[in-house]
Image (cartoon, rainbow, N blue to C red):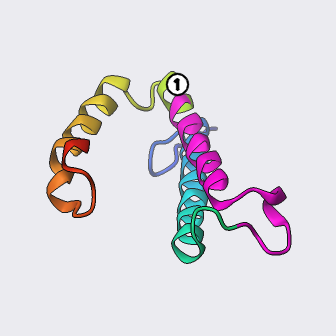
Amino acid sequence: MSTRHFNNLTPAEAERLALLSEECGECIQAVGKILRHGYDSVHPEGKDKGNCNRDNLEREMGDILAAMQIMKETGDIDQKHLTEWREDKLTRVGKYLHHQPKDFL
């Protein structure tokens, strides 16, 4: 007999959310390293295969995009809604960004 989980997620849905969560965490870690050491810094012991922090951030952001694509293709999220929310954020965030070019947003 199959028992539904309390959150009504299938194992596949939970797995996709876990993937997204892990990738977001790794991206946050990459941002932290840039804030502490700069974009062009590399690990002093050669870890990260000699990649600079910018390379690591780009890789982690790409991993997030991949997780998002999987979630779009499986119907967890809707591309139209993502686009709408992105545009909404771009119209709202400008007043909180003090150091960005005014014509950027």
Quadrant of the snapshot with the C terminus: top left
Residue 3 is at least partly visible in this image: no
The one nearer the camera, 87 or 43, is: 43
Compared with 86, 31 (above or below) is below
Point out residue 65 in the picture as x, y percentages from the top left corner. 53, 37
Write the start and end of the magenta stretch as one range. Answer: 42-69
Is 83 placed left or right of 62 in the picture? Answer: left
Q: Nearer the viewer, residue 45 or 75?
A: 45
SS for dot 1: loop
The picture places residue 69, in percent across and down from the top left corner, at 53, 29
- Residue at 76%, 70% in the rendered image: 43
- Image location of residue 46, percent across then percent down: 85, 67
Does residue 35 sit above or below 21 in this rendering? Answer: below
63 in the magenta segment: yes
Tell me which residue sits at (23%, 35%) in the image: 87
Count of numbered tags: 1
Q: Tell me which corner region of the image, top left, top right, bottom left or bottom right, holds residue 51.
A: bottom right
Q: What secondary structure predominates along the stretch shown in magenta?
A: helix
| Relative depth, front residue between 30 and 20 | 30
Which residue is rendered at x = 64% and y = 62% of the image?
Answer: 40
- Position of 91 compared to 38: left or right? left
User: Which residue in the protein does label 1 denote?
Assistant: 74
Residue 19 in view, yes or no? yes
Pinpoint residue 2: horizontal percent, then vertical percent. 61, 38
The front one of 24 and 61 is 61
Residue occupying the point 14% across, 57% down: 95
Position of 90 relative to 40 (above/below): above
83 on left or right of 1: left
Q: Is residue 24 left or right of residue 99?
A: right
Residue type, label 1: Thr
> Does residue 39 belong to the magenta stretch?
no
